Image: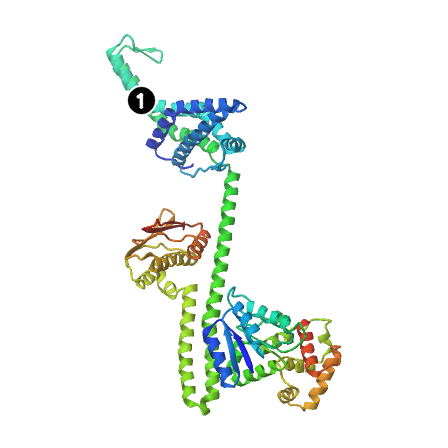
């Protein structure tokens, strides 16, 4: 059995749906009239108002159905932003989503409305039984009949009222969820993407995220190659040169040779330092040793900014841990370099089936989203279906939110 | 001898200049990117250019391309190319004109200062010096049906040492045989590779090129 929302929410949704009966009828009629009159200019004008209003109504119903059925219901409308009125209407005419909206209106005011009213009626029936009893008492002549049976004694009336309350309640209780599933299921069917469209959409998303991930990985490898080439490798070559020249000079000019050897020693230390920083860029030792929370803490303590850290990472896979670490590290590095912040905060906690990470500061804002750093982070997160949002108005504050599913 | 150095890493540029100067080789200009290297080569017309393969602006292979273009402008202009890693493809592109005066070495070879300075002189006088690493790859790879198949193992060994810029005397010393025996081998190599009779130096370059082209 599919899960649904609780009975109170269902009844509320039915009530809202019934209240929307009027607007739905109006929009359906206007939509049909507008479509019929499109050859005349007036139809186009009408549709320019009606179609967006229909979408608004459909969006409301969609979110209601989503709440009741507890599963996502999404629809892809063809984007018509910035188009002229005629082309816009032409696009709408070719967009299956708009036609499905229209079909939904029809189903909503017929089957949907009937089901909602039925459920509400069953809900109200026990109340009616009590009201009926009161009326029977007060106006015995008018309300002595119940279900075609002539009721003469109070005992009979109580029995009838109690039977009505019990039967009504039981009927309502057991039908409310199936009726809701039918009603909102039909809405979801008409308002949402078909199963095939959902899968196609998913494939598109995966294709994009895979490309982003591949880009991020390639850029990462290129960066590592560069770092080694310009850093440790070059220093080791220089070290070799110094040692070679020193070996030649050691007898002729011992002082110069000594100088070269000292330089060589410094070079070897620098080369080691370079290798360390490359290793840190691949997989930081502190992440390997102490996990995500301490690795983030280690980055934060290196910055001249006061941090408020709330790090509660759940158990997650190593690749995901690494992606989140580099995401946070990149944000913190940017904060240290560009934000001029004096205080910052990082929160990392599980939320539903995802990890939510927020990195913020009190700096000057205006973070550069097109920079390779943040784009790289987005690419790495996309591989895990993760998302990144950056809010950084000029003048600050900057808040970066990352959310990655980990269910 | 007047030399121009093209190397973007300051540490290595200074180290190279220091080694060359210590051996009475004049460094007339240094460049840290490809365009300024081209300018320096035109301006100073040096006897030799020592060039890093990877240089700004694109940090890919512009040093190599500058070297090849310079040799197109000034045929047989001696160029010693240095790199952090060696590719047979690059060696072949450098030698393609068959004019000699080409060196292609790993940067770490510089630390053997004596051998490096010797290579500098050899390239400046029209010799060919390939890194042992390039030669090792070539010996390991022996395609079927190639001209190389005609050579005996010993001849291939001699050719390998020749590619590293060794003279007959040096090859003889390395292989513990007489110089006469080596010159017999080199003649056999030249004729088996169908190389025309010409100056010995040029034939050595062509033999190495044949080796690379296989």
Image location (x, y in percent) of residue A69? 41, 35
Relative horizontal placement of residue A134, taking residue A389 as reference (left or right): left
> In the image, what residue occupies the spot 53% across and 39% down?
A196
SS assignment at label 1: helix
Q: Position of residue A327 (x, y in %)?
A: 39, 56
The image quadrant where one finds the C terminus of chain B is: bottom right
Residue sitting at the far top: A141
A337 up-or-down from B25: above or below: above
Residue A124 lies in quadrant:
top left
Residue A96 position, x and y percent, is: 52, 33
* Colour mapping used in the image: rainbow
Which residue is at 50% across, 66% downward?
Answer: B56
Q: Residue B6: image x %, image y %?
A: 52, 73
Residue situated in front as seen by the camera: A149 or A355: A355
Q: Is residue B78 visible?
A: yes
- According to the picture, the residue beneath numbered tag 1 turns out to be A126
Residue shown at 50% from the left, 56% from the top: A215
Instruction: Tell me if mark 1 has few (under 14), some (14-19) or many (20+) residues whose alpha carbon lies within 10 angstroms of its own.
Output: many
């Amino acid at each position: 059995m599919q899960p649904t929302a609780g009975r109170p929410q269902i009844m509320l949704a039915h009530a809202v749906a019934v209240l929307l009966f009027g607007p739905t009828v109006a929009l359906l009629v206007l939509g049909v009239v507008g479509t019929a009159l499109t050859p005349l200019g007036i139809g186009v004008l009408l549709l320019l108002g009606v179609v967006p209003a229909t979408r608004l109504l459909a969006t409301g119903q969609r979110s209601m159905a989503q709440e009741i059925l507890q599963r996502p219901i999404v629809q892809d409308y063809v984007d018509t932003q910035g188009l002229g009125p005629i082309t816009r209407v032409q696009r709408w005419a070719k967009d299956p989503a708009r036609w499905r909206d229209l079909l939904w209106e029809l189903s909503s005011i017929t089957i949907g409305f009937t089901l909602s009213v039925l459920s509400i009626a069953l809900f109200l029936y026990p109340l009616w039984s009590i009201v009926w009893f009161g009326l029977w008492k007060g106006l015995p002549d008018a309300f002595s009949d119940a279900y075609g049976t002539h009721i003469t004694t109070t005992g009979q009336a109580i029995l009838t009222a109690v039977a009505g309350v019990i039967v009504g309640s039981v009927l309502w209780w057991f039908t409310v969820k199936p009726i809701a599933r039918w009603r909102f299921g039909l809405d979801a069917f008409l308002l949402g993407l078909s199963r095939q469209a959902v899968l196609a959409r998913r494939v598109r998303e995966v294709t994009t995220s895979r490309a982003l991930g591949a880009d991020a990985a390639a850029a990462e490898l290129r960066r590592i190659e560069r770092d080694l080439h310009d850093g440790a490798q070059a220093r080791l070559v220089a070290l070799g040169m110094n040692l070679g020249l020193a070996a030649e000079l050691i007898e002729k000019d011992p002082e110069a040779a000594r100088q070269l050897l000292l330089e060589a020693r410094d070079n070897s230390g620098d080369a080691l330092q370079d290798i360390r920083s490359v290793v840190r860029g691949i997989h930081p030792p502190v992440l390997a040793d102490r996990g995500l929370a301490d690795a983030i803490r280690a980055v934060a303590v290196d910055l001249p900014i006061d941090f408020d850290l709330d790090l509660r990472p759940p158990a997650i896979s190593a690749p995901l841990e690494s992606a989140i670490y580099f995401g946070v590290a990149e944000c913190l590095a940017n904060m240290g370099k560009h934000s001029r912040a004096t205080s910052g905060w990082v929160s990392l906690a599980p939320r539903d089936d995802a990890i939510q990470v927020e990195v913020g500061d009190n700096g000057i804002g205006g973070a550069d989203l097109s920079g390779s750093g943040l784009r790289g982070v987005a690419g790495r997160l996309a591989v895990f279906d993760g998302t990144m949002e950056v809010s950084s108005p000029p003048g600050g504050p900057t808040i970066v939110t990352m959310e990655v599913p980990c269910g | 001898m007047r030399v121009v150095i093209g190397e973007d890493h300051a540490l290595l540029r200074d180290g190279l200049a220091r080694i060359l100067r210590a051996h009475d080789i004049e460094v007339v200009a240094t460049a840290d990117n490809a365009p300024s290297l081209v300018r320096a080569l035109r301006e100073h017309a040096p006897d030799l250019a020592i060039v890093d393969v990877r240089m700004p602006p694109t940090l890919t292979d512009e040093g190599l391309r500058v070297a090849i273009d310079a040799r197109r402008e000034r045929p047989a202009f001696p160029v010693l190319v240095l790199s952090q890693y060696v590719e047979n493809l690059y060696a072949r592109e450098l030698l393609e004109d068959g004019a000699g005066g080409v060196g292609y070495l790993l940067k770490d070879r510089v630390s053997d200062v004596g051998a490096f300075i010797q290579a500098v002189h050899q390239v400046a006088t029209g010799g060919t010096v390939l890194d042992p690493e390039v030669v090792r790859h070539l010996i390991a790879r022996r395609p079927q049906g190639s001209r190389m198949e005609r050579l005996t193992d010993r001849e291939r060994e001699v050719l390998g040492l020749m590619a590293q810029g060794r003279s007959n005397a040096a090859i003889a010393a390395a292989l513990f045989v007489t110089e006469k025996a080596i010159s017999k081998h080199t003649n056999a190599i030249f004729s088996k590779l169908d190389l025309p009779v010409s100056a010995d130096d040029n034939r050595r370059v062509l033999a190495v090129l044949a080796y690379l082209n296989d």
